[in-house]
């Protein structure tokens, strides 16, 4: 979600239960760099700067979710979901209050 999206989300009076898929940021950067290499494109942002930007973005998302009583945020760790999809499916279903099969 971009900064403008975060601001709209923060002002929304609607209740929501967003899922935040998280992944080790070094893996995100490696994946991004690999994609750019395959496209023969230079990376416009140095890895250390990109890491700081990603960290700040995640901090902003978590902060907004923490101060809004109408939002409940569930962080979903990518590596855990890959390793235990059935367990995470149950956790997500319980968090959303609905069966994921429908």
Image: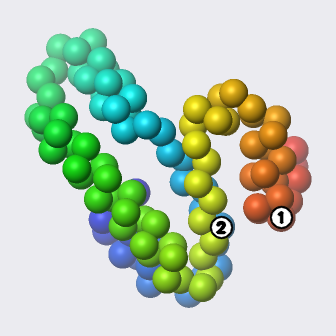
Q: Residues within 10 Å of mark 2 (few under 14, many from 20)?
A: some
Q: Is residue 20 above or below residue 30?
A: below
Left or right: residue 65 compared with residue 63 = right
Q: Which residue is mark 2?
A: 17
Instruction: Give how far across and how far down residue 33 sits, in percent.
Output: 26, 23
Secondary structure under tag 1 reads: loop
Q: Is residue 57 left or right of residue 41?
A: right
Residue placed at 36% from the left, 67% from the top? 60
Q: Are marks 1 and 2 in contact (CB under 8 Å)?
A: yes
Estimate the spatial distance between the alpha carbons at disc 1 and disc 2, rounded to whole Å. Answer: 10 Å
When the figure is inspected, residue 37 is found, relative to residue 28, above or below; the finding is above
Q: Residue at x 64, y 79 (%)?
A: 15
Query: In the image, 84: left or right of 7?
Result: right
Which image quarter: residue 36? top left
Q: Secondary structure at mark 2?
A: loop
Q: Which residue is mark 1?
A: 97
Horizontal side of residue 4 vs 20, given as left or right: left
- Residue 5 seen by the camera: no
């Amino acid at each position: 979600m971009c900064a403008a999206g975060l601001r709209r989300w923060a002002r929304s009076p609607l209740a929501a239960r967003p899922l935040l898929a998280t992944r080790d940021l070094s893996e995100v950067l490696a994946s991004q760099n690999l994609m750019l290499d395959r496209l023969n494109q230079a990376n416009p942002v140095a890895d250390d700067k990109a890491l700081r930007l990603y960290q700040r973005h995640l901090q902003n998302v978590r902060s907004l979710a923490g101060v809004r009583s109408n939002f409940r945020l569930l962080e979903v760790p990518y590596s855990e979901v890959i390793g235990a999809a059935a367990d995470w499916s149950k956790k997500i279903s319980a968090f959303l209050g609905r069966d994921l099969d429908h």
